[in-house]
Amino acid sequence: QEPFVVGSKSFTAVAINTAAKAGEWIKSKLGDINRVDTKYSSHDLVTEVDKGSEKLIRNLIMTHFPDHSFLGEEGVEPGPEASSKALKEVSDAEYLWIVDPIDGTTNFVHGFPFFSVSIALAYKGEIIVGVVYDPARDELFVAEKGKGAYMHGKKTTVSLDSKLSESLVATGFPADRNGALPINLKGTLALAPKVRNLRSGGSAALHLAYVAAGRLSGFWEIGLSAWDIAAGALLVQESGGKVTDTAGKPFHLAVRNVLATNGQIHDELQQKLVEAEATGL
Ligand code: IPD
Ligand code: CA
Ligand code: CA
Ligand code: CA
């Protein structure tokens, strides 16, 4: 079976159109949010635009592919346990769409224009299509398994930096202040003096897209979910980069602690993170 196409419908085309439609709508809502609620903790925000975007995406995808399964952040109970459980529940799905309707909700709420729509399609547990769309810059990143990654039709390739000291690296500061954040802070303390500089833009999916495009040489974060990473991980791999967990084990959909790099700085960065985790804050 050819996994990229059902009948005459290209999965990638549907993913791109859907991400573009959702992104356009989200952008039109920037600065026009009526209500901000909290989810798992007081740092974990959600708006009616997150929910509306997910509804729009789900409707479009399910109209095209009614037999496919769908996993979207806003359809899942908040918190790390619930997100792992939700992923397990759909692990038997042949075709599974994994969607983050707005990655970077905190930025969206504050009008900081760095957020994205992330849409991935997995076939028997393997990601075959990844689309990340940044509506503020109208930048669209697309990857197909085995076929490369592109930004507006131009092939993306990872950076050539081979030294940490010449690398621009990003991380994220998760909403889970008790588990994931302290571990990430240790890594930040260890890496900040070693790299050229650190960035934290606030959208894991866009950070991964930036690693794919060579704008960043590495990105790591503790405590992410499949919808934050699925599309971006394929972008990085198809751009010649490397994605593992922070312990250096191979990437798969259930990985929560992610390390994505241009490949060249991977082992050194990974080593530093392991050392950092063993230290006290
Ligand atoms: C968040 C963003 C952020 C990262 C958080 C994620 P959300 O996703 O990716 O950059 O630091 O860990 O939860 O909630 O805005 O979709
Ligand atoms: Ca969220
Ligand atoms: Ca997210
Ligand atoms: Ca989200």
Image (cartoon, rainbow, N blue to C red):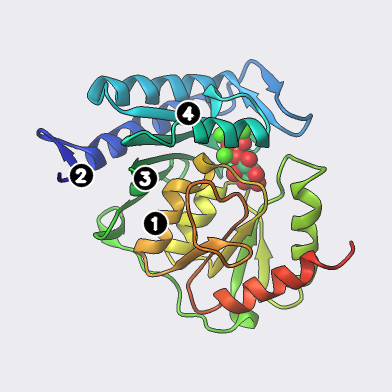
Task: Decide which of 91, 165 is in the foreground and name it.
Answer: 91
| Residue 18 point in image, percent of width and height | 33, 31
Identify which amino acid the numbered label 4 is placed on. Answer: Ile
Q: CA distance from mark 3 to mark 2?
A: 14 Å
Tell me how far mark 1 sits from mark 3, CA to CA. Answer: 8 Å
Quadrant of the displayed image that contains ligand 2: top right
- N-terminal of the two: label 1 or label 3? 3
Residue at 76% of width from left, 34% of height from top?
A: 43
**3 or 4: tag closer to the N-terminus:** 4
Which quadrant of the view contains residue 74?
top right
Q: Is residue 260 visible?
A: yes
- Residue at 54% x, 55% y: name it: 207
Give the quarter of the image for residue 270.
Answer: bottom right
Which of these two is toward me, 276 or 203?
A: 276
Reading the image, the residue beneath label 2 is 4
Q: Judge depth for marks 4 and 2 and give the one in front.
A: 2
Q: Earlier in the sequence, mark 4 or mark 2?
A: 2
Q: Which residue is mark 4?
A: 26
Q: Residues within 10 Å of mark 3 (few under 14, many from 20)?
A: many
Q: Amino acid at mark 3?
A: Val
Give the residue at mark 3: 131
Gap in Å between the C-alphas at discs 4 and 2?
A: 28 Å
The residue carrying pointer 2 sits among few (fewer than 14), some (14 to 19) or many (20 or more) residues within 10 Å by Cα, namely: some
The residue sitting at 25% across, 55% down in the picture is 153
In this view, the mark in front (3 or 2): 2
- Image quarter in which the C terminus is found: bottom right
